[in-house]
Amino acid sequence: MESLVLTEVIGGLGVITLNRPKALNALSLEMVRELHNVLAGWRTDEAVLGVLLKGAGRLDEHGKPHGAVHFCAGGDIRFIHQAAVTGDLSLDDFFTEEYALDHLIHTYPKPFVAWMEGITMGGGMGLAQGATWRVATESIRMAMPETRIGLFPDVAGGYFLSRCAGAIGEYLGVVGPHLHVTDALTLGLADAHAQAASLPDLLASFRQMRATSADDLLSRVKAHVEAHGLPTLPEATVTVHADQINRHFSLHTMPEIEASLQRDDSEWAQGVLRQMAGHSPLMMCVTLEQIRRARSMSLADVFRMERGMVRQCFALRKGRDSETAEGVRALVIDKDQQPKWRASSLSEVSPASVEVFFESPWPLRSHPLRDL
């Protein structure tokens, strides 16, 4: 069976391909471990001057590309649900090792390029946002939609969302809207845009001429991307509403935000309320607090905070009773779209039920991410 992570070194460029296209390249524990092993080895490998990470697309019966290419849809939520329900301890390993992998990318000593096509969500954002150069293509669908499945925007979502201007990070984390290429660029979640079809030519250029240094490699990537940018960009969908976002999502609590949106009779505000209607009220409140705390925290401390938070997601109520297991059941497993949330409305969420997510289950000396 073909590996779920493919690697090749081309003219000094280490190319990693997430190779699980039928699952939209969602991350399994096996993939996380393989990615970490590859990157750890390449960190000191003189043959590798920089890294490019991309997703594989499906192939037809003749081995030719078939359908859309997606970067990474996130973590494997079917595995997460099954592990939560059965008490599988590898669930702890998954989150610890995924966060350690993401931190490795954020701190990687060589140029790291994320080539973002199609669905780039959740764990895919965790991989991409630590990259040196984040390239968005015309097909990108970017989001942090975790509150819809009873989770929060993890993988350092607190870090990169809180660094967006104003209260936009709160909006992106709580509501989880889908973003296109222009949104990714204007929000600072991508550095450049390029035509997806130009990637083979980029790789071919390294086959023809090896990069002479890490700086040369990154310069060549940037020059290629600039030369193959998209001829036109769609209009932004988020920054045009920045004033409204800041007015509503800078308020102190989620009930205040909801009430403020209800008083706003604009089509945009009513659309936001409709989006929020299916999300976990508890996890929207937790996410609001997460992003605000993360704004003044270091990257490593954000990862450690979020590792404690995700442990609480499955420890406060175990098995099928956890908010996340119920959210995944309703959205992905049974697909009834009728999650039975612990709190049915934002007004039912108590401050104490939010605060407990920020109580670390471990002292720092025994934290699974203490060495970050």
Image (cartoon, helix red, strand yellow):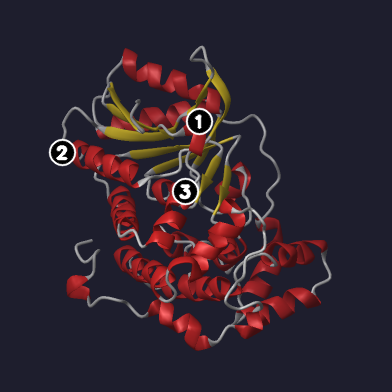
- Label 2 sits on what residue type? Thr
Asked whether 294 or 18 is in front, the reply is 18
Q: Earlier in the sequence, mark 1 or mark 2?
A: 2
Residue under the image location 59 percent in, 69 percent down: 280
Q: Residue at x 22, y 75 (%)?
A: 364
How packed mark 2 is, by other alpha carbons closer than 10 Å (few <14, some 14-19, many 20 or more), is few
User: At which x and y percent is residue 32?
Assistant: 32, 45
What residue is disc 1 on? 226
Residue assigned mark 3: 74
- Name the secondary structure under disc 3: loop
Residue 99, relative to residue 192: is it above or below? Answer: below
Q: Disc 2 marks which residue? A: 44
Disc nearest the viewer among 1 and 3: 3
> How many residues crowd around disc 3 within 10 Å: few (fewer than 14), some, or many (20 or more)?
many
Q: Nearer the viewer, mark 1 or mark 2?
A: 2
The kind of secondary structure element at disc 2 is loop
Q: Residue at x 55, y 42 (%)?
A: 119
The spot of residue 85 in percent (x, y) is 43, 61
| Amino acid type for the residue under numbered disc 3 | Gly
Q: Which structural element holds mark 1?
A: helix
- In the displayed structure image, the side of residue 161 where residue 219 appears, left or right: left
Work out whether mark 1 precedes mark 3 in sequence or the reverse, and give the earlier one: 3
